[in-house]
Image: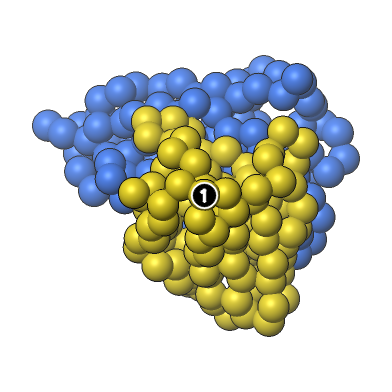
Amino acid sequence: QSVLTQPPSASGTPGQRVTISCSGSSLGSNAVSWYQQLPGTAPKLLIFANDHRPSGVPDRFSASKSGTSASLAISGLQSEDEADYYCATWDDNLNGVLGGGTKLTVL
Amino acid sequence: QVTLKESGPALVKPTQTLTLTCTFSGFSLSTTGMRVTWIRQPPGKALEWLARIDWDDDKFYNTSLKTRLTISKGASKNQVVLTMTNMDPVDTATYYCARLQGTTREYWFDPWGQGTLVTVSS
């Protein structure tokens, strides 16, 4: 089973820019998506097709992918951004692959 | 507006079979390109992809759980059913269904249902 590796935690102060990484071999040939999970809620789509933001997602959130690595950037960090963030992709067997999640703390 | 909602038992006993239903609105699984997927999350842990069913009845399963999972279209046109056999306490989790969007090599989950917590305990 393919895996995606994320750092377990990240932190920043209000107004800062933070990045969360995601790496895995499946990213070499498949797009990545990113999800935000606020405490006690279902995940919500943040980024699709590597770097596209759905309508309603603030432009403070951006993402990129290169080879087998991807990253999510949050600029102008706000307290409401404190959440778990997950990356996801698909493997060559058309199985979904999700990262282990990164807990973002706003200090 | 697309919505999905999971339903099923909150408590199952070890060795029992779990049956969950995802009831959705705002799209039809008969439409070309539509797909529904299941994902679970044990308490305090990461998300885990489980299964997917496509408009043409193609089905895909988590390799590690494949022998225990069955995904199918429900009796009602707006339902997808997931069954998991031989439940164990480690299967305690919140189970989510989500619409799968995109195309080959560029899929994403959106939107998600609210999730349903299933506890496995005797």
Residue nearest the observer in this picture, B70 or A3: A3
Give residue A33's quadrant in the image.
Answer: bottom right
**Chain bearing mark 1:** A
From the viewer's perspective, is residue A105 above or below residue A65? above
Examine the rendering and report whether any part of residue A37 can be seen.
no
Can the viewer see residue A107 in this picture? yes
Residue B3 in the image: above or below residue A103: above
Chain identifier matching the yellow colour in the rendered picture: A
* Chain identifier matching the blue colour in the rendered picture: B
Give the side of residue B13 with respect to residue A71, left or right. left
State left or right for residue B105 relative to residue A21.
right
Count of picture labels: 1
Q: Residue B14: image x %, image y %? A: 20, 39
Q: Residue at x 59, y 59 (%)?
A: A73
- Residue A101 position within the rendered picture, expressed as x and y whole percent measured from the top left: 42, 57
Which residue is nearer to you in this view: B18 or B95? B95
Q: Is residue B41 left or right of residue A45?
A: left
* Residue at screen point 25% across, 25% down: B11
Residue drawn where x is 62% and y is 42% of the image: A45
Above or below, A62 relative to B24: below
Is residue B86 found left or right of B62 in the rendered image? left
Tag 1, which secondary structure?
Answer: loop
How crowded pointer 1 is (Cα within 10 Å; few <14, some 14-19, many 20+) is rated as few
Identify residue for label 1.
A15
Snapshot quadrant of residue B87: top left
Q: Nearer the viewer, residue A81 or B64?
A: A81
The C terminus of chain B, quarter of image: top left
Farthest front residue?
A15
- Say which residue appears at 34% left-offset and 22% top-offset: B9
Return the residue found at the far left: B122
